[in-house]
């Protein structure tokens, strides 16, 4: 199972929209979780959704409409975030092909396959953005009004290059070209494609 984290510089940067597009690009059984941290919350709020009814306008509804089997929302303070994640993980099936997580702070509690960070230098930056951007495999920069992909590493394993192609809905050849242009080395090539 691949675990994908979509993090971002600030609210309203387009994380949910990016996840909707990713869900449409992936084939398989998908679970999605939005994690929100609020320091004024002492309790843990968890909502697990399977039905789009009465839920369409929420992020979980958007995930369901895009094609996930199940979607969850978690809100807690930072100290309770791990407990909330554990509660959700205990109560969902384990046989998903993909789990997609939205949020910055969740990066400390999930061992992801791939981390994506969305940025736009024209917007404010959340406190948690620096940590998330440092841990990202790629940064998608919307600062110039387009979708610039910045690799946040000197090398990438072949499997992750294939996964990135699936996430973005582009060909493996396109990812290979981007990696070559960025002088990123491919390790562990699966089929001799790079």
Image (cartoon, rainbow, N blue to C red):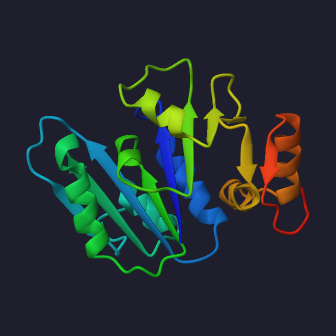
In this rendered view, identify the residue nearer to me: 29 or 154: 154
In the depicted structure, whether residue 187 falls above or below residue 61: above
Is residue 77 visible to us here? no
Q: Residue furthest left?
A: 42
Residue at the location (68% across, 60% down)?
163
The C terminus sits in image quarter: bottom right
Residue at the location (27% across, 67% down)?
88
Residue at the location (65% across, 57% down)?
167
Is residue 34 visible to us here? yes
In this rendered view, identify the residue nearer to me: 160 or 116: 160
Residue 106, percent from left and from top: 36, 48
Residue 12, percent from left and from top: 44, 35
Q: Is residue 160 left or right of residue 127?
A: right
Residue 38 lies in quadrant? top left
In the depicted structure, whether residue 10 falls above or below residue 45: above
Residue at the location (44% across, 59% down)?
62
In this rendered view, identify the residue nearer to me: 47 or 113: 113
In this rendered view, identify the residue nearer to me: 117 or 170: 117
In the depicted structure, whether residue 184 falls above or below residue 98: above
Residue 93, percent from left and from top: 37, 81
Q: Residue furthest front?
A: 188
Q: Is residue 164 left or right of residue 131?
A: right
In the depicted structure, whether residue 83 falls above or below residue 103: below
């Amino acid at each position: 199972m691949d675990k994908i984290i979509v993090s971002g510089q600030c609210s309203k940067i387009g994380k949910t929209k990016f996840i909707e597009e990713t869900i449409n690009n992936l084939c398989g059984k998908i679970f999605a979780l939005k994690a929100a941290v609020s320091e004024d919350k002492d309790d843990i709020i968890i909502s697990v959704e399977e039905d789009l009814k009465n839920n369409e306008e929420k992020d979980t509804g958007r995930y369901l409409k895009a094609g996930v089997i199940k979607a969850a929302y978690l809100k807690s303070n930072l100290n309770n975030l791990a407990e909330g994640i554990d509660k959700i993980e205990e109560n969902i099936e384990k046989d998903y092909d993909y789990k997609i997580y939205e949020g910055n702070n969740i990066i400390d509690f999930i061992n992801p396959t791939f981390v994506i960070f969305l940025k736009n230098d024209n917007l404010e930056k959340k406190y948690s953005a620096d940590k998330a951007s440092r841990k990202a495999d790629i940064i998608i920069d919307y600062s110039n009004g387009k979708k610039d992909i910045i690799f946040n590493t000197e090398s990438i394993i072949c499997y992750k290059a294939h996964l990135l192609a699936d996430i973005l809905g582009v060909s493996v050849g396109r990812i290979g070209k981007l990696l070559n242009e960025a002088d990123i080395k491919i390790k562990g090539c699966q089929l001799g494609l790079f």
